[in-house]
Amino acid sequence: MTNRQIESIDVIVFIVAGILVILLMFGFILYFLISYKSKKRDYNLLEIQKKELDDQKKLLENTLSELRATQSQLIHSEKMASLGQLTAGIAHEIQNPLNFVNNFSDVSKELLTEMREDIKKNNIEDALELASDVVNNLDKIYFHGKKAESIVKGMLQHSRAAKGLLEKADINLLCDESIRLAYHGMKSKFMDFNVEITTIFAQNIPKIYIIPQDIGRVILNILSNAFYATIQKSKKISSDYKPNVTIKTLYDSSGVNVYIRDNGCGIPQEIKDKIFQPFFTTKISGQGTGLGLSICYDIINSHGGRISFESKEREFTEFNIFLPNKSNLVVKIPNNVV
């Protein structure tokens, strides 16, 4: 091969190499442009998706805020309904001792007037006898005044916010108070309401550590539901139906059981698993928010206890509240209770 031929081949190789370099550079530039456009398209798509996510997040935050506000309003409504019922019961309870105070005050005024006349007439023996009657009346006024005072103290205890402080409380006494309050509260709503109440209280129950106003609220709520169930049943069947609610307490080394049984309309099988769900109610519109039993469930759980029930439709419902007897129990108050 001649030198000229070798030089021609070198030139061709150089030209081909140059063309390849140019093609590689062009390919690289083309790849860069395509990659840039693709990344820009992806970036724009991500920006759009981010904006959509931000909008959805704001929408969800607004919805959540509205749901929380609605939940607070419903919880407030449940508390107000419970407070109204409690107030009606307390008003009736406090009216009795006030009536005694007023009556004995009137009688004492009459006796003092007679005593003054006897003193003027120098009838000392009659005056002393009347004075003795006045003293007896004052003792009765004092007794019923103290009773009214204890009712007011109980009302204040029920109305104050729970602080998670445990107190030694008599569960039988708490049940007895709740029965009267629930009965009179229901009587204020349904004037023709009547029910036989049976109490079976164990006598060996020591005072246990609980938050009395919270446990009282639970018992009051379940009793009110029991009374309401008998009212609904009495509307559906013949007049020979005799409404009855039984409340029983039992005690052993583990703690206290409170049983509340009614012979009302019962709970249908298909809704039994929903009873403790928030906002679920079987009452007609305007008579319940569906938070009562949900709050009861939270209160009992916060005490380390249990709440359960058995029911047969059109025959009975029985709730069982178990409270452990623990002095070192730490109660965490649920948010929807305070």
Image: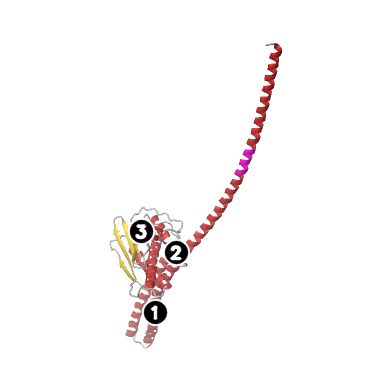
The colour style of the image is: secondary structure
Marks counted in the figure total: 3
Q: Position of residue 315 (x, y in %)?
A: 33, 66
Residue holding disc 2: 159
Please report contact status of discs 2 and 1: CB closer than 8 Å, yes or no. no
To which quarter of the image does residue 225 belong? bottom left
Q: Does residue 333 sit above or below 118 in this rendering?
A: above
Comparing 198 with 256, the one in front is 198
Q: Residue at x 31, y 69 (%)?
A: 198
Helix, strand or loop at label 1? It is helix
Residue holding disc 3: 308
Q: Which amino acid, by three-letter code, is at mark 3?
A: Ser
The quadrant of the image that shows the N terminus is: top right
Give the label, 2 or 1, closer to the camera.
2
Nearest to N terminus: mark 2 or mark 1: 1
Check residue 263 in the rendering and tell me which mark sits there, or answer none: none
Say whether residue 119 is visible. yes
To which quarter of the image does residue 12 belong? top right
Q: Residue at x 68, y 17 (%)?
A: 10
In the picture as drawn, the residue positioned furthest to the top comes out as 2
- Whether the magenta-drawn stretch holds residue 227 is answered as no
Comparing 84 with 226, the one in front is 226
Nearest to N terminus: mark 1 or mark 3: 1
Is disc 3 surrounded by few (<14), some (14 to 19) or many (20+) residues within 10 Å? Answer: few
Residue holding disc 1: 103
Say whether residue 318 is visible. no
Q: Which amino acid, by three-letter code, is at mark 1?
A: Asn
Give the alpha-carbon distance from disc 3 to disc 2, as whole Å: 26 Å
Give the alpha-carbon distance from disc 2 to disc 1, as whole Å: 30 Å
Q: Which residues are magenta?
A: 37-45
Q: Position of residue 144 (x, y in %)?
A: 37, 73
